[in-house]
Image (cartoon, grey):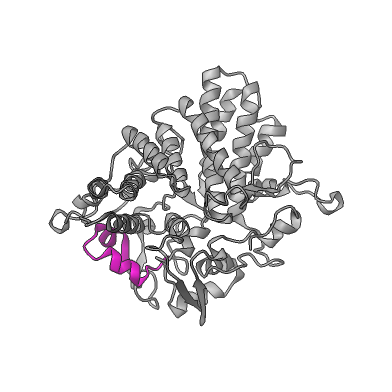
Amino acid sequence: MLTFNLRPMKFKYKLYVLFFAASSLSACKKYVDIKTQGNLVPNQTINYRYLLNSTQSFETVANLSDFASSDIDINDPAQQSSLSGTQLYSYYRGSYSWQSELYPFGSPYEQDLNWNALYSTILYANTIINELPGSDGSESEKNALTAEALVHRADAYLNLVNTYAKPYNAASASTDLGVPLLLTQTVSQSLKRASVQAVYTQIISDLTSAIPSLPQSQAYNTLPSKPSAYGELARCYLMMKDYVNAARYADEALKLRSTLIDLSTLNSVSTANYPRRIINPEILLSKISLGGSLTFAPVTLKLSNEYLNLLGTKDQRYTLFTVPATNVSSTYTGRFFYKESITGETRNQGVSVPEMLLIKAETMARAGDVNGAMSFLNTLRVKRFKPADYIPATAGNAEEALVMVINERRKEFFGTMLRWWDMRRTNSEPIFQRTYTKTFNGVTYTLAPNSNRYTFPIAQYLRNLNPELEPNP
């Protein structure tokens, strides 16, 4: 494990946190191997292929946004008590209730493993991007591997900027604080936060640079391909509210991959009849939440009544992927998300075919094309109901269509960061503006429109190590 004495150096060794990230994810060994131990030699191109094949180094993304969603309601006293009994769950209950501190400084859990995981991915990607030019492979081989690393880096930065920075606002993005933008694997650069605009500009640059050298498909969807990069660009532009480009890249992704899993034909789901995540045809790039599956009490996600009313009992996503509380604990009530237990797979956070369809539907609704929006919406919905229960969605106007699309995103992406990201990006729009409340251990927490609580805090531990890291308000 890499450790450094920072205080005598007056914080000149600024990337300590990134090396800690690598070691904290049990990935430190691979990084050290490639740099110093001789097992993986920098001038051999094949070794960068081995590094990119290591899913533990690139697949993990942040989980804080999963718990902050309005679709989750942790209101059973027994579950609240279990989550409160140890500081281990401080990040869970803190993000769930939008608190200003998630990692109590001085506690055994002062580290933000979400931050560490994402910068660990960036560290590995930068190593590949920076070192490949000097390796022994052909230019086409090196370009292809570099392209994969660029996609992983872009995804990590998109996660970081939507976790630790304000929602994108074109009027203020050039001055809003983003996250440190690190593009090399050196250990002496500044950790001063780049602007939100600078981070998004880098994400777009990485993805557009990667596309020409990416294959149209890969053996496993943990490895980036052209549909992966197009999907990431569509997601990125949607978060920027650039709906023209979001639609453009969703189209490009769908041209190459448009397969949906047909839930309408299933009476139950198991590991025998549901595809594994790495070969799931809906997934354009597999990414999973830090901490893995939430398959046991007290961390299992309880569906809010508002979400259940929205989903309805005829939807196959209700029938197949949710269960009564008694399946989780005899002391719990209500209904719980159980897809991970049923399929034996951690929920996917990466870009997907359903996401591309709904990006197309949203951009059409925003452009006033109601029929087009409903067409894309129903392309997904018809696969989510038994034939006898399916009724095509219709909308009387563009605003109604837009609301239906956003609600469909809630149904499709439950338990992932996308609902929280949608809350962030739409909370300034009158038709979506609302004040949310959650009560935990007798304390009611409020999330008002445009609140600073839509941005997670940067852990005090990180800021103490790196004073350049300005805190979020």
Q: Quadrant of residue 397?
A: bottom left
- Tell me if residue 473 comes above or below residue 41 in the rendering: below
Q: Is residue 348 left or right of residue 382?
A: right
Residue 292 appears at what percent x and percent y?
48, 54
Q: Is residue 336 left or right of residue 86?
A: left
Assess whether residue 412 is covered by the magenta stretch.
Answer: no
- Tell me if residue 15 comes above or below residue 385 in the rendering: above
> Which segment is the magenta one?
301-323
Residue sitting at the far left: 388
Q: Between residue 287 and residue 404, name the one nearer to us.
A: 404
Task: Say if residue 284 shows up in the picture.
Answer: no
Q: Between residue 83 and residue 199, name the one nearer to us.
A: 199
Task: Say if residue 84 shows up in the picture.
Answer: yes
At 31% from the left edge and 68% from the top edge, which residue is drawn? Answer: 308
At 61% from the left edge and 70% from the top edge, which residue is drawn? Answer: 87
Q: Between residue 383 and residue 177, name the one nearer to us.
A: 177
Q: Between residue 9 and residue 107, name the one nearer to us.
A: 9
Residue 426 appears at what percent x and percent y?
43, 58
Assess whether residue 310 is covered by the magenta stretch.
Answer: yes
Residue 183 appears at what percent x and percent y?
64, 37
